[in-house]
Amino acid sequence: MLKKATRIILTMTIGIFLCMLDTTVMNIALPAIQTGLNTDLSHLSWALNIYTILFASLTIPLGRLADVWGRGRLYLLGLTLFLLGSLASGLSTTVTLLIVGRGIQSIGAAIVFPASMTIGIQSVSLAKRTGAIALLGVTQGLAAALGPTIGGAVTQFWGWRGIFLINVPLTLLALGLSIWLLDWRSHVRESVKLDIAGSGLIMLTLLSLTLLLVKGSDWGWMSQSIIILAVVSVISLGMFIWTEAHVAQPMVSLALFKDRQFNGAALATVLSGIFLVGLMVLMPSFFTKVQNYSELMAAIMITPASVMIFMLSPISGLLLAKLGPRLVILVGSIAMVAGYAVISVMNASHYWQFAVAAVLIGAGYGIIIGPITVLAAGGFTGELLTASQSVIGVFRQIGTSLAVAIFVSALATNLTTAKSRVQTYATQTISALSVSKQVKTDALTTVHRQLAAEQSSTKTTAPITPAKTKRLITTNYEKVLKQQHLQQAPADVKTQVHQKVAQQVTKQVATMNQQLITAITGIKAKTKTELTAAFIKPYQVALPFTLLMILVSLCFERRQRAHN
């Protein structure tokens, strides 16, 4: 029979898994959702972004509210909201309802995530804390990494609604276990007061910052809206820091940031999150759009990273005492740098080369994420422990948002350049062909349509189809009859004319098709080359910045501190 503390920790992993899974599970299902709800991507993107924005903005104040109102009680409320949001999202019939459902989900997640960490950690003694924190930390990283894989598999077999509805049985299980195991009848702590000013300022800071990051590419990084958001986030952050330094019971104690290892953990959380999510956010689209794999296959192809996280996270958290924080974080950082080096020079046509990169990046993240969660908690207890988990949770969301902002924005710029090059090449190639103007126009329209969808098709069929050939024969036949005044000619004469026209048109079409197929094959090869380069370039640009992770490892001590 499992001890109560173990049962509580395992119950908390369910809540953490659900919260972190839903940060990435939706990405790969966007095309299916777009079709299912008959909406455009600009509106649908809000269903994705609202989760990140509200999750990041509300985690700290709601984590603090749990200290006042009772963690068990608020945890049950968070799970209930997450359940209702999942149901609303899965059953939505319009994009507006989906956005509302995702918003409710994110509020529930902002309650559940920090409360799960704090409840789980405080259920064990300081002596057993490392193992508990490592398990909770592994769950976070693994859920985020498995999101695309689970999303692809569920979408393939049960449709896009399944990615939200699979939360329902798991949330009900977590609710039942929490009611059984947790102290949710505790009274409100009258001695603890909420820092209203700090709450408002931190929400304003994080709301403006995350909105800036997720919409910067769409609105334009130098647009008035983005500049205003940047100014608001900086000013509100400054006011928040000043407020927290002067208030009696701060929302986030600045004492956290006097701890060198906590600062290192925060930086490592952001950087490792950027470079892991950078892999997860672009490569599924690369495999589906450029390599023409199904969503399920694309999801499976990035699983080597998830497998390595699953394997190494538990081990690395337990190696802290033997090897020391600095060495463990350094090894993980070097692995992620190596992974980015491989992906920057790989031949994308050979999957094994990507698999090597995914293994290295996943291994590096797995080695880092276990210890980071332990080091972020440090020797903190009580409200400092809650604050540390809330703040690290926010930094994790900021890392995710930064990754999407940086990599998606870079990809968008690269795709614009790639499309322009392909369009120019296609225009020059087709213009040089000795075919009719209409055939050229049709061919260029097809190229333009594929570029708009950012796809590289592998199918090369005859541009002038048998149906078009038949229509051309009919048109030319009637034209010859009219020119030679043969409308009233005997049937056998018309038959001979038709046969002669058919032979001439068929021969001309065969010649034109051969020219077009050769040209289109070249255009498709050019398209694939340019689109591949567009997807790989962000990793090449990011490679030097991965070295920052090695510098961050110096923030950590050579040996783990003993808890007091």
Image (cartoon, helix red, strand yellow):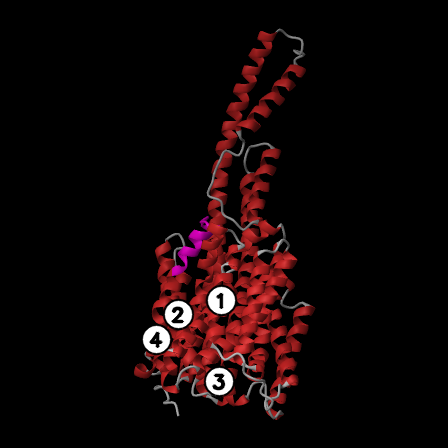
- Which numbered disc flags the more N-terminal residue, 2 or 4? 4
Percent x, y for residue 500?
Answer: 54, 16
Query: Which numbered dot is residue 385?
Result: 3
The amino acid sitting under disc 2 is: Met
Quadrant in the picture for residue 483? top right
Q: Which circle, 2 or 3, is nearer the viewer?
A: 3
User: Quick one: SS at disc 3?
Assistant: helix
Mark 3 Cα shell of 10 Å, populated few (<14), some (14-19), many (≥20): many
Percent x, y for residue 465?
Answer: 53, 30
The amino acid sitting under disc 4 is: Ser
- 4 and 1 marks in contact (CB < 8 Å): no
- Which numbered disc flags the more N-terminal residue, 4 or 1? 1
* Label 1 – label 2 distance at C-alpha: 26 Å
Q: Which circle, 4 or 3, is nearer the viewer?
A: 3
Near-viewer residue (48 or 22): 22
Query: Which numbered dot is residue 316?
Result: 4
Q: Is residue 294 magenta?
A: yes
Q: Taking 437 as reference, is 278 above or below it?
A: below
User: Quick one: SS at disc 1?
Assistant: helix
Query: Which numbered dot is residue 336?
Result: 2
Pointer 1: what residue?
A: 18
| Quadrant location of the N terminus in the rendered image | bottom left
